[in-house]
Amino acid sequence: MKKDSGYVDIEVTGINAIAVNESREKLRSIGIDGEIISTPGHSPDSVTLILDEGIAFTGDLTPEIALPDDDVICRSSWKKIYGKKVTKIYPAHGKIK
C-alpha cells in the first residue's frame, strides 16, 4: 500500500470468515435479512450482499456496461444477482442502478 493512499492496512487477526452457505444465519444473528453470494468477476473472490428486500451491494464486480461480450464469468455473476429478484443495486464501481 502506498503511504499517501489514505488507506489503512487491515489487521486480519481476530477476523471471522463467513462461508457463503452460512451467510444467511450469520447475517440474521446481527439483524440483517439477506445473504452473501459469490460473484466473481474483476476479482475471483468478489461477493455480493443481497438483502431480502431486493437490494444488492456488489463487491468488486465489473459494471455490466463495461463488460466485453466474451466476459462469461462477470456475466454469470450478474445473472446470479438478477436471479435473486433484486430491484436496486449499489455497485462498488459506477452508479446506483
Image (tube, rainbow, N blue to C red):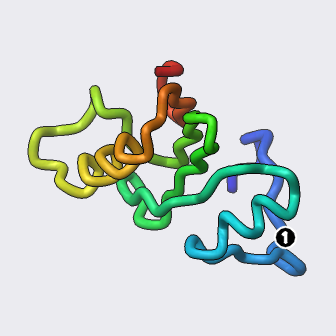
Q: For mark 1, does the 10 Å Cα neighbourhood hold few (<14), some (14 to 19), or many (20 or more) residues?
A: few
Which of the pair 79/2 is nearer the observer? 79
* Image height of 67 relative to 23, above or below: above
88 and 52: which one is in front? 52
The percent coordinates of residue 16 (x first, y second) are 80, 77
Q: Residue furthest left?
A: 70
In the rendered image, residue 61, in percent from the top left (x then y), is placed at 43, 46
Q: Please, is residue 94 above or below residue 9 in the view? A: above
SS at mark 1? loop
Along the line of sight, the residue nearer the viewer: 83 or 7? 83
Query: In the image, is 8 to the left or to the right of 66?
Result: right
Q: Is residue 32 shown left or right of residue 60?
A: right
User: Count of labels shown?
Assistant: 1
Q: Specify whether 13 is left or right of 67.
A: right
Q: Is residue 13 above or below residue 70?
A: below
Residue drawn 49% across the image and 58% down it: 46
**Viewed as shown, does residue 13 lie left or right of 33?**
right
The amino acid sitting under disc 1 is Glu
The structure residue drawn at horizontal position 46% and vertical position 21%, both measured from the top left corner, is 97
Indicate the quadrant where residue 90 lies: top right
Residue that numbered label 1 is attached to: 11
